[in-house]
Image (tube, rainbow, N blue to C red):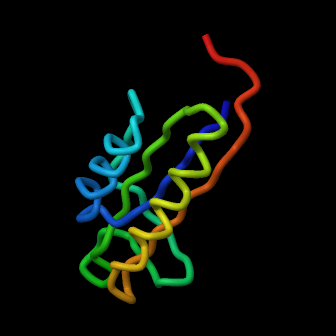
Amino acid sequence: MKMLMIICPDNRREEVHKILHQQGVQGFSEMAGIKGEGKTGKHFGTHTWPMESVMLLAVVEADKAKALIEAMKECSTRLFPEEGMRAFVMPVEEAI
């Protein structure tokens, strides 16, 4: 099994939800108000740097993770330059 960690602009969360559902993901966890700094700039939810991100975690079968990463890559092509999206795949050794 694999865990997908997706960090995307808060205003793109519904688009990511739709992709997850289209890819047959049964469930995910979401954390809002993610702040950080990276290639697309600072996202701190302040007056100076107003953007914030959302992080979604989904555990899926290994073969599904590849399709999800491809779907996230395609989605990221529609972002504005100041928006950023990252998706990471991590191994899941055990789940209950």
Of 22 and 12, which appears nearest the observer?
22
Query: x%, y% of residue 53?
Result: 37, 62
Q: Residue 95 vs residue 57: left or right?
A: right
Residue 41 vs residue 46, the one in the foreground: 41
Looking at this view, name the residue that lies furthest to the bottom. Answer: 81
Image point (51%, 51%), residue name: 68
User: Is residue 3 positioned above or below 50 on the image?
Assistant: above
Kindly identify the residue that appears in the image at 61 percent across and 31 percent down.
Answer: 61
Q: Please state if 67 lies on the left or on the right of 52 as rendered.
A: right
Residue 91 lies, in percent from the top left, at 73, 37
Name, please, the residue furthest toward the top: 96
Question: Residue 6: image x %, image y %?
Answer: 49, 54
Task: State whether residue 82 is above or below residue 7.
Answer: below
Would you say 50 lies left or right of 5 here? left
Query: In the rendered image, which quarter is residue 39 located in?
Result: bottom right
At which x and y percent is residue 77? 41, 79
Residue at image location 32% in from the left, 40% down from the top: 21
Quadrant housing the C terminus: top right
Query: Looking at the figure, which quarter contains the N terminus?
Result: top right
In the rendered image of this protein, does residue 26 appear above or below residue 49?
above
